[in-house]
Image (cartoon, rainbow, N blue to C red):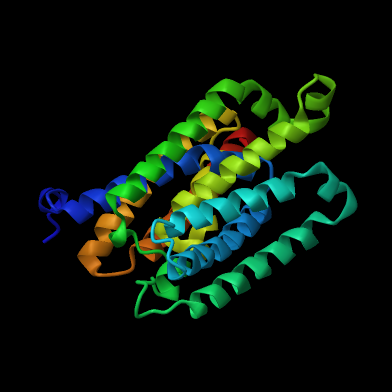
Amino acid sequence: MFDFIDYLGVPFVQRMLMAGILASLACGVIGTLVVVRRNVFVAGGIAHTSFGGIGFAYYMQHLGWAWFDPMIGALIFAIGAAMFLGSEKIKERYRQDSTIGALWVIGMALGVLLINLVDKNKIQVLSFESILFGNILLTSSFDLIIMGSILIIIYIFILLFFKDTEMLSFDEEFAKISGIKVGLLNTGILILTALTVTILIKIVGVVLILAMLTIPAAVSNLFTKRLSMMMALASVIGVILATSGNLLSIELDTPPGATIVILMGLAYSFSLLGKWIYIKVRSLRQGT
């Protein structure tokens, strides 16, 4: 029998639920910007580049740098990719889709190569499945501290620059005319995306990151066009679905990351259907 109260008393369940909540709160804000600005492919490039950082962290541990946590490696590579993609010179000289594609595959290949160079007898390395598809059950207190710190940075940035970010998201040309430093703000948003990606790696892994980053925001976008409302609604949707997915995965003994994403996919499908039915009913009423 599904016993929610009993689950809450287990320490690892508490950590996995908290990790899901922190990740959802970050995705509600950054995912909305990714969806509105149509930067899903950019976010994917940053996410897959971060895999190289995970491999790099394990290799540094192999060389004796025991403190070099995989999340730190992922953070460094993700921020590096964000700054590279946000560079105005790179945008002017090269096609963005080609640049993203190159970073995407190089990051993945580098991660695989470096992890295979690590002595598995000396260093405890997560399986490729855990890295690619997540393993929220292994969330530690240190991971939660990093997630909480990143979430605070994201919210401070948004609170300070919300008006400029809103203007940039909906009309970049008008933002330039208004005197907003578009290039700098673009880079800042990409760095925030990199921070969010780092949070999500532990939850759903590199491969499934885009789903958690974009689906709650896409659902909220069906019902509101105001940026602030989209962020708030996406955060609430993400928290509900992530928490439900975590608890359901324990009950059904299924992978938590995949379970969360499936629930989000179902939520998006039903939202699309509900919106379509609403539009049809409204048009029929107006016709009569």
Residue 136 figure quarter: bottom left
Residue furthest front in the image: 64
Side (left or right) of 135 relative to 9: right
Q: In this view, does 3 lie to the left or right of 132?
A: left
- Residue 131 is situated, as x and y percent measured from the top left of the image, at 44, 67
Query: Could you say which is closer to the camera, residue 121 or residue 104?
Result: 121
Q: Nearer the viewer, residue 150 or 235?
A: 150
Asked if 155 appears above or below 256 in the picture, the reply is above
Q: Is residue 119 above or below residue 110?
A: below
Which residue is outermost to the right? 93
Q: Residue furthest top?
A: 178
* Residue 22 visible, this angle: no
**Residue 282's x, y, as percent?**
57, 37
Q: In which quarter of the image is the N terminus?
A: bottom left
Q: Can residue 126 be spotted in the picture? A: yes
Classify residue 60 as left or right of residue 3.
Answer: right
Quadrant (top left, top right, bottom left, bottom right) of the C terminus: top right
Residue depicted at 47% across the width and 69% down the height = 63
Using the image, determine if residue 220 lies above or below residue 81.
above
Residue 120: x and y, percent?
A: 38, 79
Residue in view at x 40 percent, y 44 percent: 147
Q: Is residue 168 left or right of residue 22?
A: right
Q: In x, y percent, where is residue 226?
A: 59, 28
| Camera-side residue of 163 and 237 | 163
Q: How many marks?
A: 0
